[in-house]
Amino acid sequence: MSDRVLVIGGGIAGIQATLDLAHSGARVTLVERAPTIGGKMSVLDKNFPTLDCSICIEAPKMSEVEQHPNIEILAPAEVERVEGEAGAFRVLIRQRSRFVTDECTRCDLCTQACPVVLPNEFTASMEVRRAIYTPIPQAVPGAYLIDIDNCLNDPPNYLPCQRCVEVCGPKCIDFLMPRTRQVVREVASIIVATGYDLFDPAALRAYGYGTHPDILTSLEFERLLTSAGPTGGEIVRPSNGQHPHNLLFVLCVGSRDRRFYPYCSRFCCMYSIKHAFQALDHGIKDVTVLYMDIRAYGKGFDAFWHRARSEGVRFVRGRPASVRPDGDALRVRYEDTLAGETREQNYDMVVLAPAVRPPEGLAELARILGVELGGDGFLQVVAQRGGVLVTTRPGIYVAGCAAGPKDIPDSVAEAGAAAAAALVHLTKRTWPEEPRVEPIAEVERPRVGVFVCHCGSNIAGVVDVKQVVAFARTLPDVVWAQDQMFSCAGVPQQEIAQAIRDKGINRVVVAACSPKTHEGTFRGVLVRAGLNPYLLEMVNLRNQDSWVHKDFREEATEKAKDMVRMGVEKARRLQPLEPRLQPVVQRALVIGGGIAGMTAAANLARQGFETHLVEREPELGGTLRHLDALWPSGTSAREVLRRAEEDLLRAGVRVHLGTEVEVIGGYVGNFSARLTDGEELQVGAVILATGAQPYVPTEFRYGQDPRVITNLELEQVLHQVDAQRITFVSCVGSRQGSVGCSRYCCASMIGQALELRRRGKHVRVVCKDIRTFSRHAEELYEQAMREGVVFLRYPSDLPPQEAIRFEDGVVSFRDGLSGALVHLPTDLLVLVVGLRPRPERLTDQLKLAHSEDGFFLELHPKLGPAETAVQGVYLAGAAQAPKDVRDTISQALAAAAKASALLSRGSISKEPLTAVVDPDKCIGCMICVPACPFGAIEMLGKVKEGKVRIIEAACQGCGNCAATCNYDAIEMPYFTKEQILAQIDAALAERPQEKVLVFACNWCSYAGADQAGIEKLQYPPSARIIRTMCSARVEHDFVARAFERGAGAVLITGCRLTEQGSDCHYNYANRHTAKRFELWKKKFVRQGIAPERFQLQWISASEGKLFASKMAEMHRVVQEYLGKLEAVSGSGS
Amino acid sequence: MSTGLVREITFDDATWERLFRATGGTFAPCFSCGVCTAVCPWGLVGGGRLSIREVVRRVQLGLEPDPTDTLWRCTTCAACVAGCPRGVDIPEGMVRLRANAWREGRVPRNLHGVLWAIHWDGNPYRRPPTHRARWAKDLDVPEFTPDHEVLYYVGCTPSYDRRLQKVARSLVEILRRSGVSFGTLGDQERCCGESVYVLGHDAYLRRYVEEHARMLAEAGVRALVTISPHCFDMFRRFYPDLRGDFRPLHYTQYLAGLLEEGRLRFTRELRVRATYHDPCYLGRRHGIYEEPRRLLQAIPGVELVEMRDHREESLCCGGGGGRMWMETPAEERFSNLRVQQALETNAEVLVTACPHCIACLEDSLKVLGVQGLRVMDVAELVAQAL
């Protein structure tokens, strides 16, 4: 019996599964073949359709994996053998050595010394690396490693190179490490999340990949778009470094192609649309996409496609016959199949979207694991268990692309689902314990210790560290200051701990690198020394000073002093904070008894949580009760339902049939619900599995003409249809206006059509783009055609009722693929209806939001599909968006995993950064209540009479309320007003007119500033940066104080906010920032502050370049301002 | 389609099902990507366009293809098949549609004569069967007996056409010098039936092939070497293996084998820059790309260069699919383009391994008035270097 789960593969699916498991108290061994976790997502630029920066939203998860005490990462490593059975597997893992110890400080001197230059395969080989290297700057675990096969020290050799060893300050390169070691782990269950590889398009010779540098794969193009990529985010032709004037994107390269991969690769349409869109954004005017069917199946995908079209991307239905170099250009020959014209055109660049194929070695891994492969080479899943997650061997689950291509949200949902399934096998949950040390009692009177790091020459090479230390000693309350070579290395860490105890230090300032990467490390030092971890302040000398001002040594030293002063002033005001534990009722409520609710409830109950399932109908099963077969597998719906019901009963779920939730309220861990059967329930988590409802058509005289039925009605009579001539019409009630694709219908419709065809009927399908994106669905589509189902195409941009007529038993429309007006004599017209949101009374009670299409809004479209902005409330199945049974089951389990993480500990620990109300100052104006993006502020009593209360469990700590409050009645611990004002004063203590005060949010802009450092982008040293959790924390008084003190300029930065959405980590809190900024700006301008001196700029975590250029711009603003000041004082004198 | 495939259609189930059956469902899986149409050589020459997708779509809509022209244009070169993501055997579908046209009596008049000629004379040229072996009358080629290693199957064109007779004689020379024991069927040899197949007369084809196969089996034929890739294709794909040891080979395959075994050796150096044209039925149809190249590269002094379109992307000469029996206006000949491609390589010899190709390419040399480029068969070059 084991409390451990093995996760194989560290891409986003593996990461998510690992985190979900660890959050539920499982111990996890994460095995990754590559040197870093992160997978494909970590090298992407932006994600569709929100255009989120990919690494910005993934990197926090990566470092959480690294820091979580329940998680062990083995990389680079591979699984060699698996013995035993579910609940008790014994796994042999072979780990390859990194040859770099954990003492590594990431100073990067070694790679500069290494003489071996190799393509960096981790970033599509568009960049080079050395033999000692880090695959990506955000690499986890232990950034650096040696590629021993390519290292000149590869023994036996008698003339060792040793260059890296010589430059390594902390001496952490060790060639004597054994090359590999074997690790044995006992695990209860296994999750396979090995992802995918891309097809090498060189095999498709006619497309010329490899014969000309300007024929790229989509991943290579992605790297061109990345600001951290080889061109710094410029789209240039590799052949000549020029910007292309016209660009062609080719879809389905090797996909939907019997010669290579007959299946659909599922996400290429969307990323190619994104690429096309970004290309326009980069100023390329002529952008064409050659497609077969646009498979924009997800939430907001169709809208994104339409947007790309309306902005000027040309979409042409066709497939190239050939791509050939022609002088300077690429000559492409294709037929525009909707115009019936063969064209030959020249493009400057051609981007191929290669098929997603099973990853190298998957077959071997399957053999080791004893699981079967599907015909397509991905792992086989058991159809009767819903056709997801469950492999052919009990206790082994699969998530993400290892079970067929899928996009990030679907992979993330499956990862959560696999975690939920894997948890069932655990006999024990493990919660890491804090180390026990004699606490330092005296913290009232600040005694500050300052530790300035050389970071080898990274800081000391530019900044005069000794001078900074001497300066620190002059600052108030500083009782100790010293320099260290590498503060984060093992010995210096002990030195800090020792100093704390010996010198009676009770506030610690570490002036080294970024808190984003090292705060955890140094907080650990404080804890080990017996000091409260929140008495630490980090000063980011490396990323935000020495790395970015290397030509301004003196100014950089002055800036370092300012920064240390800011740090000390903040540190003097730090207070010990305790993570809060909130009790959680370990009971779950699942609303909706369809397959989603049944699956989620059964899983939670099997994990041992008391689970209530409420269903308004007298029977379980929801939509599935009305279905005959599930396509594309053709599995009996009844069978799937029977097994789900069996699981449900065996797990001991308490089922409330014919019952609804009447009233529900409360907050995370503590909801109370009253059911219509009178029962009162206290629950910690709520899963909404209320499903969707089929659209009821009004088109085609449905309901009046007996020859017109819906596909769901057909399902009931499929085996008794008398009609001979049957016509299906797709997308009735889908894909119009704000209503997107309903996802389930194409595969299901084709299944029905094929069934009828096999009964000798004349079957015709009148459809838009066929969207058989799910696993085996494209194969089903092809089979249906092969057997004689005829597919005819009506225009994508018209709703069916406008494009198609049904009169006198004849369906008439124009077939796009022949241009002909087609008349189909029809005995039975089947309307294939979409799914619509179900009106839900509980929405307001739970304070849930809706997306534009009326379905529930998820927490994050990429990484939080099963969560909502309301903590403790989760979404399962079609309540979030239309989906088929497989995706429904996977999302239901993902929701269960989230609920399990909450419920399993019995309490919820929160970083003590949540808002605190001072009841004496609160006047009860309630202005903060609607401002909270999480509904975490409760009104106690009436406006002007009562007070407010922060629901600590729901508060996320953005600080928007504090900025809203006009009476300083709300305080944000660790980012208090007093602390921030002190930082402002410290920053502007000397020559304030020359300085730009920058507020940067923790998640994006501060990370963007760090990125500028990592990329060594130089900018003038006038910026003084103050970190807050969210830009919405910034108060009017901060800005006012800065100008009062004479700041040259003030810049507020935050996560990106665009029309497509927001990167904001606090549910669009930055909208408040934007609004406030406009208001304040007017005010300050009225007060005579020139508008350019007060600015707002969105900077995402990857946009180091933007950060640097903005700083340069702000510097000019300050210089001009100084010029004006001098002119004024000159004329005055 | 703006090309006016058809303005308006009312689905007729009976016709639809009949066409579906007649084409064996060949076209059914097509999802109209248009690669076939974009890749088809007819799109490269002026004037006569052939939209394959249009033909396919018509069948999918239950419409007969335009019987007069389109259907008979296809050279069955299979360039479209090589590019087809759904693996539709378009030439096969075309042949089946032609079969349908025979059944409905909608076939160009002159094509009847070709089949009658094969029926009466054993060759499509209406040449006397008794003249069939005249090309070899001074060569003393033995009549095939079962103890011969191979049957040398000459085929109609090399038997009767004066230009191609040189190829037939070259091969005799090569086989002899390599010490191969072989024989021919002399004037008993008959057409392989290729024209019957590509012109789509499936009923006659079945009977013809059955008889001919029996005749070969009775003669004790096992290994059979052809000059023409088309004959090779017929024997390989359509002839039943009556004795269980029938092994048709194209001569390039056979010679490549002899080369490897060391039986075929070169003594002379040919200082020549050559480019090789892949015949459709050898390359795309049977994947034989390497053997002819191996032979050429083995000849001392031969410098082999490739044309723009080669191997899977080879450009058809225009002679297949029964096009030899139809008139193609000079400006619509693919072979003109091919000669152009050969000229771009600065080769002195355009080498190939198919009688149709040689005929078409030589024709184009004349039409275009090209100097400094010769068309030769692989066998001719090999024979020169012995």
Image (cartoon, coloured by chain):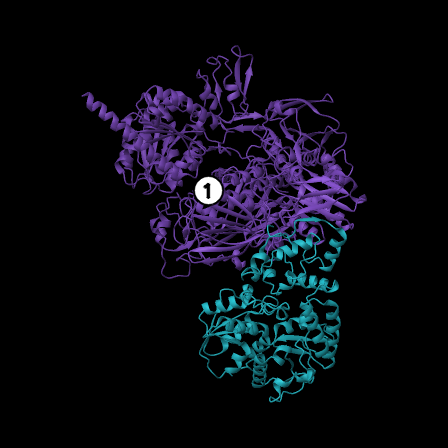
Chain colours: A purple, B cyan
Secondary structure beneath dot 1 equals helix
> Can you see residue A15?
yes
Number of other residues with Cα within 10 Å of mark 1, as a class: few under 14, some 14 to 19, many 20 or more: some
Where is A144 relative to A923, above or below?
A: below
Q: Nearer the viewer, residue A633 or A268?
A: A268
Percent position (x, y) of residue A307?
53, 38
Query: Which subunit holds the residue at mark 1?
Result: A
Percent position (x, y) of residue B35?
58, 56
The answer to whether A133 appears left or right of A742 in the picture is: left
**What count of labels does the image hold?**
1
The answer to whether A982 appears left or right of B46 in the picture is: left
Disc 1: which residue: A280
Q: Quadrant of residue B281?
A: bottom right
> Can you see residue A646?
no
The answer to whether A372 appears left or right of A160 in the picture is: right
Where is A571 relative to A410, above or below?
A: above
Where is A261 relative to A1084, above or below?
A: below
Percent position (x, y) of residue A391?
66, 47
Q: Nearer the viewer, residue B357 or A497?
A: B357
Q: Nearer the viewer, residue A1119 or B135?
A: B135
Amino acid on which disc 1 is placed? Leu
Q: Nearer the viewer, residue A93 or A33?
A: A33
Percent position (x, y) of residue A981?
37, 22
